[in-house]
Image: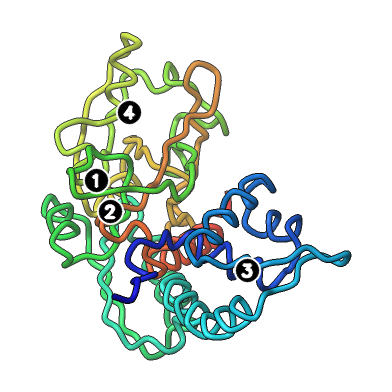
Amino acid sequence: MIKNLFNNLDLNLLRTFYVLSQERNMRKASKRLFISQPAISQALNKLRHHFDDPLFIKIPTGLKLTPYAETLAAELSPVIEQLADIVNQQTKFAPETMDTHWVIAISPVAINALSAPLFSLFKAAAPLASLKITPWTQQTQSDIAAGKVFIGINYPVIERSALASEKLIELQSFAFVRKKHPITTQYAALEDFAGVEIASMISPDWNDEHSLALDLMTQKGLQAKIGIRSELLDTLVKITEQSDMVLPHTNLFPLHNYPQLRPIELLVNGSAFHIDLKAYFNLENQQLAAKDWFIQLIQQTLKKVITY
């Protein structure tokens, strides 16, 4: 009965053989495979035993293949190259040729600033594809897990088990007030806002039942209260323009659209206060090239829209 040489062959050994057949030098093969020369020698001994052939013979310039090894290497070459193409294809992504429909969910705190510029960059890179931008809701995490939403953008939330996340950018916190607000400084500590009413932006899954600004002030024993809460930025802006309310936000706030407001840099314990903006996606898409492309596109958009 003819011995089946493949069934009990360690494919790592076959890769070592293939690289050795190309390099014909133990040191070069070791460097290319990221393993030590003794490990190469040990693998070669196993290969010789498996194939019952010397395979390589030492010569002054390196290694010479035996006739059996020459034939084996010639027949393996196209097979291994095809296998490499299959594996490497998983990391290739050509947005200019894709015609897929994508759905992105963005938190209310970011959707006004990101939507239009993100769409512009998307269409420039992927003219055949389509993009739907939808607000982040309390259903969004379930939609990401179910594959209905590809990527969600929000402040840090408690992730469901099927989700993973990546940090997009670190945002700086500001308080936005009307131009003639009693607080006239460029910088202000929490203590300077004691007694104010807060126009609180709701970001579902992040602050449905609380206000971070109010929480920080309460921790310091400062008096403040919520004047209004809404997911609609335009509503909060109009109220802030007509009152002494303070609208906490970040440097993602599209200030150029609201010339009647001005930013006050918020200081907490003497330092600028920061918060992360994150991308959320299905854990199954962790290694997907399209996911990496979208995150890079979002980060590129963020760099364009954050100007202060």
Residue on which disc 3 sits: 55
Marks 2,3: beta carbons within 8 A: no
Asked if labels 1 and 2 touch by Cβ distance under 8 angstroms, the answer is yes
Dot 3 amino acid type: Leu
- Give the Cα separation between the discs numbered 4 and 2: 18 Å
- Earlier in the chain: of badge 2 and badge 3, it is 3
| Residue located beneath label 4 in the image | 213
Q: Which of the two labelled residues, at mark 1 and mark 3, occupies the earlier sequence position?
A: 3
In the image, 271: left or right of 146? right
| Numbered circle sitting on residue 107 | 2
Q: Earlier in the sequence, mark 4 or mark 2?
A: 2
Q: Element type at marker 3?
A: loop
- Image location of residue 29, percent across then percent down: 69, 60
Q: Position of residue 188 (x, y in %)?
A: 51, 25
Q: Label 1 sits on what residue type?
A: Ser
Question: Label 1: which residue?
Answer: 203
Q: Nearer the viewer, mark 2 or mark 3?
A: 3
Say which amino acid is labelled 4.
Ala
